[in-house]
Amino acid sequence: SGSKPSGENIVSGAIQKHSERMYNDLTALITKHLLSIAEKLKEINDPLLHVQQFSYHLAQYKQALKAIVSLFHHLNRYYVTSILCKDLSQELTKLFNGYISDNSQLFAALNTLGMRSFAIGPENLSNIIHQLYALNPEYAKRAPDVFSRFIPNVFGYTDASDIPALIQWTKELQEQFPERTVNPSYDDNYTGYG
């Protein structure tokens, strides 16, 4: 009895036959795109703008990565995982790291911004630092002061010898805030009710 091949069998057969070429074409296309982004980032000398543009491209890449991995599920399953013993998402993340995030200009910009408190919003900088750390924990060593502010114990626990530096850093932050009273004064007749 001649049964028709299922869609799954057709896809897996095509993947097995053309998987190496598909994988190589995919990585070549992504590499070309990443090189284009890297060139644009190299032209940005302003540290704040450089970090903002990096953050934008990282978010775009992460979003595209989800779609690509989903679209190439069968390629990942039948070729990347079983033949290459790798994971498509991890391999494409390595490409991003190699061409975009693993560069001295980005870490110089982060170090510069780290010395200028609130040059970039703390939430934004924290988000960027956490995303970089997720990409590669070794990045913390390239901007240790900035990473240690946003990732507790990234380099281990605080030593007693670190306390004077932490106190000084806290004082510098406090000096940058305008004077604010913690408990605003109310006139004596204020009861707190309507």
Image: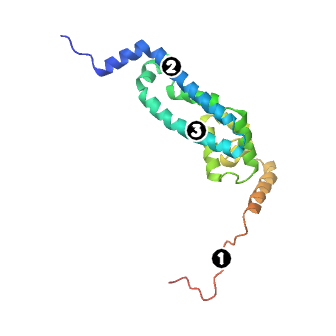
Mark earlier in primary sequence (3, 1): 3
Please give the name of the residue rendered at 72% of the width and 63% of the height, measured from the top-left corner. Answer: 177
- Camera-side residue: 146 or 156? 146
Q: Amino acid type of disc 2? A: Asp
Mark earlier in primary sequence (3, 2): 2
Residue 122 position within the rendered picture, expressed as x and y whole percent measured from the top left: 65, 52
- Camera-side residue: 53 or 179? 53
How crowded is the residue under tag 1: few (<14 C-alpha within 10 Å), some, or many (20+)?
A: few
Q: Amino acid type of disc 1? A: Pro
How crowded is the residue under tag 2: few (<14 C-alpha within 10 Å), some, or many (20+)?
A: few
**Mark 3 to mark 1 CA distance (whole Å):** 43 Å
Q: Where is mark 2, residue-wise?
A: 25
- Tell which tag, 1 or 2, sits nearer the viewer: 2
Please give the name of the residue rendered at 46% of the width and 30% of the height, measured from the top-left corner. Answer: 68
Q: Where is mark 3, residue-wise?
A: 57
**Farthest-out residue, left:** 1
Q: Quadrant of residue 137?
A: top right
Would residue 22 be seen by someone viewing this image from the given angle?
A: yes
Residue 35 position within the rendered picture, expressed as x and y whole percent measured from the top left: 62, 28
Q: Amino acid type of disc 3? A: His
**Mark 3 to mark 2 CA distance (whole Å):** 22 Å
8 sits to left or right of 156 = left
1 sits to left or right of 161 = left
What number of labels is visible?
3
Q: In which quarter of the image is residue 103?
A: top right
Please give the name of the residue rendered at 53% of the width and 24% of the height, measured from the top-left corner. Answer: 29
**Farthest-out residue, top:** 1
SS category of the residue bearing label 1: loop
SS category of the residue bearing label 3: helix
Mark earlier in primary sequence (1, 2): 2
Please give the name of the residue rendered at 79% of the width and 49% of the height, measured from the top-left corner. Answer: 162
